[in-house]
Amino acid sequence: MEMTQDVKKQLMALAGMTDESEFEKFVKDMVPEAENTIKQQNRHSPFQLHYIKMLTTIESKGLDEFARWNGDIEKQLQYTFNEINALEEFVDPRNFLKKQESPSETLTTECKSLRDAGNKHYQKKVLDLALQAYSESIMSAPLDDKGKGRDAALGLGNRSAVYFELKEYNQCLDDIAAAFIFGYPIELAYKLWDRQGKCLEAQGFLRDAAKAFKACEESLPQSNLKPSKREELAANIKLTMNSLDLDQCKGIYDPNIVKDIPCPFKIWEAHPKFPHFSDSLNIVFNESQGRHVLATKNIEVGEPVVIEEPISFHLSPFKMATNCSHCFRACGNSVLPSPLLKKAKFCGFRCWKLAMNSYHPVEARFDITEVFYGDDPNSQLSGCLSLAYRAISQKKLAFFLDNKEKLFTTHDKLYGTNPPPGFSYEKDEHYRGLFNLVTHYDQMQIKDRVTIMIRSVVLLKCLKAGGYFGGEPTTQLQLSPDELFIGKLLFHFQCGIQYNLHTIYQVNGVMEPSKRIPLQDIGSGVYPTTLFFNHSCAPNTIRVNQGPRVIIITKSFVKAGEEVTDCYGIHHMSIPRAERQETLRRGYAFECQCQACKKDYPLLASLPNHLTPQVALKLGNTLGKYQKLFHDGKYGKALNICQEYIRKLEHLGVPLPHRNYEIAVIALCSSLWAMAKDC
């Protein structure tokens, strides 16, 4: 097994060796044991490898020293920060990171070869292969420390020409804008200005087209064209500009307009105070259930009750090679590289801009996935770390300081149950919802609190190294008031998010009717409205993802006054009651009192399946119709058949739990996921 230099150094230190040749001989003699140790090292993240030493340092002084500051998170944070900084190797979080390789000449040669291949395909008008080659060239191009790269820019310029040929003008304009950002050569800029003008003209944005043609004209003196060719092109540009009938201008082109990914589902009537909720829902509170959601009117099977984007989300680093870091979708031929982090990519300019204008500059300057994730997908720690970090990094420091009193001071367990007049749960108010998550802090063991505090200190150091607090990152021992406040939020958010995060899934494979959906875990998110739902091991809703977006849809008829429930991935069909309850108790700090637990619903294989002849006759071949529609790609109609079948089961008095219900729900899920995937 190949051993990285970092792992080798760690193992040599453990073995007390300084001579590399002596160590290599030792490894050769002890191959099985050494390989096992290497596997263990690779399986753990750098944080996991160093965490024990940090914890031991604090424990050596006695946990009572930490506990005496209970109730004052900022003092516990400063105490933990000081103790960790007492260990020289932890003063600078960069010590956690592996050394990054510099861009090589091989990369430059590779991207040029791919661009040449794209040119050949373009000349032959094999445009799909040209797009693919240019995209691969762009992604393999080296970038400098300012995020610029001539080869990446040239690839983007060439790809824009393909999109122009395909009359995909918005894609063409995006690539032109990106080419300039990545450092397109000034002597060739006239080509892009001319193409931009033609794109805008074709879409009716004539005034903007005139500006682009003017920029083209003004860039000609810097071009490498021969004087005669330059004069000829300048004359043609003037003719084009004179031919534009500006009175017919469609309007002003706005490159900053960001269109949401279309959603195939719609809430029939939105809640007046919770815009992402159906108006058939209400948030209530009692001491035994905490905050939970009740139906205020009857809700039909298959009705969307929540559609929302996460307040914080994070793509698994093990999906960054294939998926967009922002929208989580598989990257196609409009892919763009991050100018700051080699392994990050974006499916297009829309996601690139959203990320660059938000969290990405801070997160890319110091990549926390290199600290908290190992080489093995099983090495990852709880998603609450990444989500708490993103909740901070996506907003400027000023946002938190300006809203300290308004959003981040009072913790109210009743928040959302009795909203005042004029209240609207959206935008910044979502942060108040995040802050008011139940943390179970008072039930935590002291060692668990110390663990979260250590993680908070490391995350705070990462923010500092990423330039979040402005200026050059420092390693001073005393935290500033601003740093203490943000560290306190990192701690508080982790405590709440760990009980309220949701895995984000993506269909990965061919879907077949009534069969297990091939879902893959691609990330995690915390959702501002979804967090109000309680868990049930037999929920009456289904969750579907469309990228990070979540859609919650009823899977049975819900009567007015009934609780509307979510499932945290712990379902009665696959896990016995005792195991479910222990998992929920340990992971979510509550005793489950759902119907599946109270009545001990059986596993899928043991579900009742008896139907009387009369009931079976009335159900007929409904699911057979569903299968044909699904095979034909008519997913909306297939969904309608599932809804009809479940209504029949309810109308005919088939009691829950029953295998036919679950078969119908699996079919319902397949239709919903297929509709979401198809958009």
Image (spheres, grey):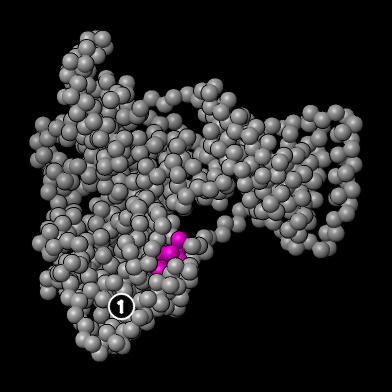
Q: From the viewer's perspective, is 650 left or right of 117?
A: left
Residue drawn 70% across and 44% down?
125
Q: From the viewer's perspective, is 175 left or right of 472?
A: right
Query: Does the rendering let one see residue 185?
Result: yes
Q: Is residue 672 magenta?
A: yes
Residue 129 lies in what quarter of the image?
top right
Q: From the viewer's perspective, is 104 left or right of 255?
A: left
Asked if residue 22 is positioned above or below residue 395 in the image, the reply reads above
Residue at mark 1: 556
Q: Which is nearer the eye, 43 or 221?
A: 43
Residue 154 lies in what quarter of the image?
top right
Q: Which residues are magenta?
A: 671-677
Residue drawn 72% across and 39% down?
123
Q: Main secondary structure of the magenta part?
A: helix
Q: Amino acid at mark 1?
A: Ser
Asked if residue 390 is positioned above or below residue 104 in the image, the reply reads below
Q: What is the x, y in percent for residue 475?
A: 34, 29
Q: Is residue 255 magenta?
A: no
Q: Which is nearer the eye, 119 or 286?
A: 119
Q: What is the x, y in percent for residue 359?
A: 45, 46
Residue drawn 15% across and 57% down?
583
Asked if residue 491 is positioned above or below residue 54 in the image, the reply reads below
Residue 379 lies in what quarter of the image?
top left
